[in-house]
Image: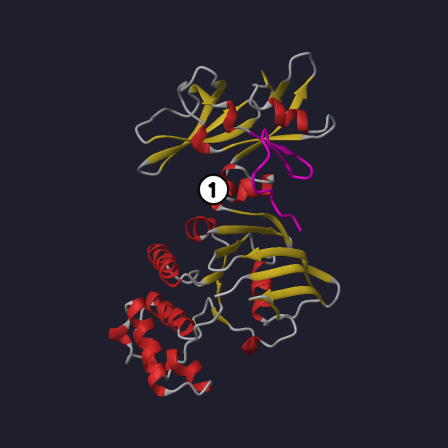
Amino acid sequence: MAEVLLRQVRKSYDGRTPVLHGIDLEVRHGEFTVFVGPSGCGKSTLLRSIAGLETIDSGEICIGGRPVQHLPPRLRDIAMVFQDYALYPHKTLFENMAFGLRLRKTPEAEIQRRVGEAADLLKITHLLQRKPAALSGGQRQRVAIGRAIVRQPQVFLFDEPLSNLDAQLRQEMRSEIKRLHQRLGATIIYVTHDQVEAMTLADRIAVLRGGHVMQYDRPQQIYHQPAADFVAGFIGSPPMNLADVARVPGATPALDFGGLAWPVPAALQPALAAAPAAARLRLGVRPEHLHLQRSQADDIAWPGTLQLLEPLGAETLATVRIGQAELVARVPASFEAAPGTALQLHVQPAQLHLFDADSGHAWHATPSSNPHAES
């Protein structure tokens, strides 16, 4: 195991199309870090650069305190698990897992020990004499992970390893990978476009967009105190509601929200004061923080009209129009009403977020203890 340190890592294609814009990141020893973001954000390119499968234009990549950006993949002491498993179809599972060790001329007794321990850890000992064609997708992925484990590398790299599995199997394998990390205590860097995978697996998450790191922090910090409106809208299912607002002139701070003017509560005033007077503003609120009934005396109440109900079993998503804006709220599964019904949404002032509508920067009422790292 080892830490991975990235300093001003830049990458472009053909010298004209920048992909990574000076990435600075530190993955600590034994940490599970997830790179997440939409397609084309640079997360897989960044992972492949760490692995040595892509060359970087400038910057430094250190693994275990050793610069490796000029070393080929085989000398970086990493093991990679790919999306497509990359198993040899004509070899048994045992031979697939042992292949890399045989290339390194590892003694046979050591091969037997390592493969046996990895197979036992992954619960595939009874499958070792089968070939990949006889396995399910989840079993093949376990073999691919086992092949990485037997290497005993300093760092494990996972490139969207669950994207070929169905929803139920993805959930099962997420749990398996998390348990595996707890048992091995390994340094893991994991790439996914699925924010649920990122939230459930990671010790820390790097949210990427357009080759920049928008925020790098613990999952709960990213969820509850996003550094930018992009992060707020990407992390969460359904994502944070975002709506443009405008200052209302007057002695008392007020905001116009979809044509509805309301006084700015004390909890939000420090964030509003931090925003430049000329800044265009965007308000954010998580669906679970919107309620149909008042919960506390200082709740804000927004009158609106029900547009849509989406029952999910344990809960229902309600889309409510407030002025010109539409907000999604998590409401009890028992709630029933016809579209067009007038109702009120209530929210605690402390649950509101304020963003710069142009830059996306968040204006927090209290500064984050772990500020975002934007490259």
Dot 1: within a 10 Å radius of its alpha carbon, few (fewer than 14), some, or many (20 or more) residues? few
The count of marks equals 1
Q: Is residue 158 left or right of residue 53?
A: left
Q: Is residue 353 left or right of residue 92?
A: right
Q: Is residue 247 visible?
A: yes
Q: Is 247 in front, or is 225?
A: 225
| Residue at the spot 71% in from the left edge and 67% down from the top edge | 57
Q: Please report the bounds of the magenta region as a residue range.
A: 353-375
Task: Tell me the element at label 1.
Answer: helix
Q: Is 79 in front, or is 68?
A: 68
- Which quadrant of the structure image shows residue 23? bottom right
The amino acid type, in three-letter code, at marker 1 is Gln
Task: Tell which residue pokes out farthest to the front in this image.
Answer: 65
| Residue at the spot 52% in from the left edge and 29% down from the top edge | 326
- Which quadrant of the structure image shows residue 107? bottom left
- Is residue 354 magenta-colored? yes
Horizontal and vertical percent position of residue 351:
50, 28
- Is residue 261 magenta-colored? no
- Give the labeled residue for mark 1: 220
Horizontal and vertical percent position of residue 372:
60, 44
Q: Is 364 in front, or is 302?
A: 364
Horizontal and vertical percent position of residue 137:
35, 67
* Magenta stretch: helix, strand or loop mostly: loop
Q: Is residue 226 left or right of residue 112?
A: right
Q: Is residue 330 left or right of residue 355?
A: left
Q: Is residue 160 visible?
A: no
Horizontal and vertical percent position of residue 264:
59, 19
